[in-house]
Image: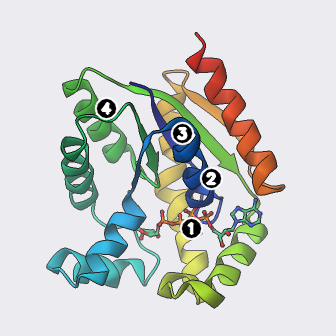
Amino acid sequence: MFNIILFGPPGSGKGTQSEKLIAAYGLKHLSTGDLLRSEIARKTPLGIEAKSLMDKGHLVPDEVVVGMISSALDEHPEAKGFLFDGFPRTVAQSEALDKLLKLKNTEIGVVLALDVSEEELVKRLLNRGLTSGRSDDTNEAVVRARIIEYKQKTTVVANYYEKFNKVVHLKGEGTVEEIFSGLCSEIDKRLSI
Ligand code: B4P
């Protein structure tokens, strides 16, 4: 089993690249953002609580997202590997993920981190907000709050995995194809070992 974390700030291309990576490598895609938006669409109690936080650009509590990921892992015992997109976003989430994977006798193979400048992130997200219907993409103050939340709580996740020598930084600016090809070459290197 080969498991990947696609890491980066909001708008860095995680969702975009995940679609291509799961098609190329047959991995199971686990996006906490998508899981939360599905709860919101179904108006579940979890979705209602999550929406009020997401609309302010805040993270959802660790126990909520860890619970969702734990269930999703259990639902796919046949998976040949998982692609984690937008998770983990805090050190507590990283520690919880490591424990969940250990129970399944597996671990994270690589953390692929997309680096994108702040102004490009804001531009991309506001642009997506014009068509996506995502309320967290339409307001610049909320977009900037998400980036602040990322700097304060999520950048440390890369430090956590750096301790285990698992992080590779890639430039997240350029065409979608160029970035995809850089990601694939990093994955292929590790799969051929
Ligand atoms: P997510 O759904 O994870 O979304 P995101 O980080 O905002 O965006 P992503 O990185 O996937 O978008 P992409 O660049 O692909 O999170 C939403 C919210 O959910 C969070 O703010 C938080 O509240 C909550 N949440 C989720 N996970 C959580 C967790 N683990 N813990 C706590 N809370 C959690 O796309 C952005 C735009 O850029 C698109 O329009 C795309 O077309 C464009 N784009 C992509 N690549 C490009 C390129 N190379 N050039 C130009 N444009 C590009």
Mark 1, residue position = 148
Report the amino acid beneath label 1: Ile
Between marks 2 and 3 in the image, the one whose residue lies nearer the viewer: 2
Q: Tag 1 or tag 4, which sits nearer the N-term?
A: 4
Between marks 1 and 2 in the image, the one whose residue lies nearer the viewer: 2
Report the amino acid beneath label 3: Ala
Between marks 4 and 3 in the image, the one whose residue lies nearer the viewer: 4
- The residues tagged by marks 4 and 3 sit, at their Cα atoms, a distance apart of 14 Å
Of the numbered discs in the image, which one, if any, rests on residue 98?
4
Is residue 67 found left or right of 16 in the rendered image? left
Query: 25 above or below 63?
Result: above
Classify mark 1: residues with Cα within 10 Å, few (<14), some (14-19) or many (20+).
Answer: some
Between marks 4 and 1 in the image, the one whose residue lies nearer the viewer: 4
Is residue 175 found left or right of 116 in the rendered image? right
- The residues tagged by marks 1 and 2 sit, at their Cα atoms, a distance apart of 23 Å
Between marks 3 and 1 in the image, the one whose residue lies nearer the viewer: 3
Query: 94 above or below 128?
Result: above
Quarter of image, res 127: bottom right
Secondary structure of the residue carrying tag 3 is helix
Which quarter of the figure is the N terminus placed in? top left
Query: 184 above or below 102?
Result: below
